[in-house]
């Protein structure tokens, strides 16, 4: 009876933390590639939704004006869902214009999970890269990043962002989740909370996995406990794998420290 009570409490706590981590952000919609941020809330994080300028199988010039784009597609959707659909492996360009910046404020974008490689240009200048996009497999340098980056504005009240994106290494093309936008301090606070919650969920699931697997090792008849323990272990690892590549960052730091020690 005590085991069931402890299990119930741990599951309830994990679900509570997961609910907190799934709190929805406000959505900011683009109309033909234009976002108006003049009335956004300083304490809110926004997901960038809506239609972006889109050029299939082309890396357009970073200074090409937005009105030169013929097609507009949602960035957060895989390009295999477009009409007409693009193959899983391929490359493309996206563009938006954000209007309504206030010079005294510091704005940022959180680049979420993106397949393979992409580069980002702000008003024609490269300011962020995750790997090296290419027009074929040999040209692409695969990488995973999920970073919060300050927009390097120079007192402009509007900016054009162009993204070159390719996918030749992953089964999921394009952006898996929308980019996040807001004031830098607000974004940083949210991502810190998300990592804290993810770490809490991981710790709870790992504790449950250890407990039930240990129970199975000492009492071999408790096969259900063993299966449940391995299930908890799988969910714990998945938590770190799919939350801004936390596990990739962790092991990269460990590997780098081992190299430094060696």
Image: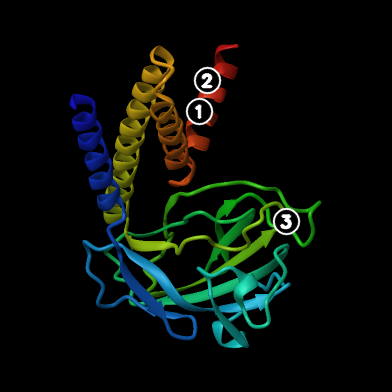
Q: Secondary structure at mark 3?
A: loop
Alpha carbon distance from label 3 to label 1: 26 Å
For disc 3, the marked residue is 168
Quarter of the figure that contains the N terminus: top left
Q: Secondary structure at mark 2?
A: helix
Q: Secondary structure at mark 1?
A: helix
For disc 1, the marked residue is 253
Mark closer to the chain start, 3 or 1: 3
User: Which mark is drawn over residue 138?
Assistant: none
- In the image: residue 5, left or right of residue 92: left
For disc 2, the marked residue is 257
Whether pointer 1 and pointer 2 mark residues with C-beta atoms closer than 8 Å, the reply is yes
Residue 214: % across, % down: 39, 17
Alpha carbon distance from label 1 to label 2: 6 Å
Whether pointer 2 and pointer 3 mark residues with C-beta atoms closer than 8 Å, the reply is no
Residue 232: % across, % down: 40, 35
Query: Can residue 63 be seen in the rendering of this structure?
Result: no
Seen from the viewer's position, the closer of residues 36 and 113 is 113
Quarter of the figure that contains the C terminus: top right
Above or below, comparing residue 141 to residue 84 in the picture: above
């Amino acid at each position: 009876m005590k085991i069931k009570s402890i299990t119930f409490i741990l599951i309830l706590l994990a679900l509570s933390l997961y609910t907190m981590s799934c709190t929805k952000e406000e959505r900011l919609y683009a109309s033909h590639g234009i976002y108006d941020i003049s009335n956004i809330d300083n304490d809110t994080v926004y997901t960038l939704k809506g239609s972006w300028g889109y050029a299939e199988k082309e890396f357009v010039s970073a200074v090409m004006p937005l009105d030169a784009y013929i097609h507009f597609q949602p960035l957060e959707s895989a390009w295999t869902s477009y009409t007409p659909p693009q193959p899983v492996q391929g490359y493309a360009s996206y563009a938006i214009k954000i209007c309504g910046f206030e010079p005294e404020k510091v704005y940022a974008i959180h680049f979420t999970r993106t397949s393979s490689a992409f580069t980002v240009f702000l008003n024609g200048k490269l300011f962020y890269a995750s790997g090296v996009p290419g027009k074929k497999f040999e040209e692409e340098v695969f990488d995973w990043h999920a970073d919060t980056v300050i927009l390097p504005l120079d007192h402009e009240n509007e900016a054009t962002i162009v993204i070159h994106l390719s996918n030749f290494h992953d089964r999921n093309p394009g952006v898996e989740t929308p980019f996040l936008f807001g004031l830098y301090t607000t974004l940083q606070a949210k991502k810190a909370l998300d990592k804290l919650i993810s770490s809490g969920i991981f710790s709870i699931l790992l504790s449950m996995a250890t407990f039930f697997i240990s129970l199975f090792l000492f009492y071999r008849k408790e096969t259900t406990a063993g299966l449940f323990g391995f299930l908890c272990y799988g969910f714990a690892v998945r938590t770190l794998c799919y939350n801004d590549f936390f596990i990739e960052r962790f092991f990269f730091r460990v590997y780098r420290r081992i190299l430094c020690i060696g």
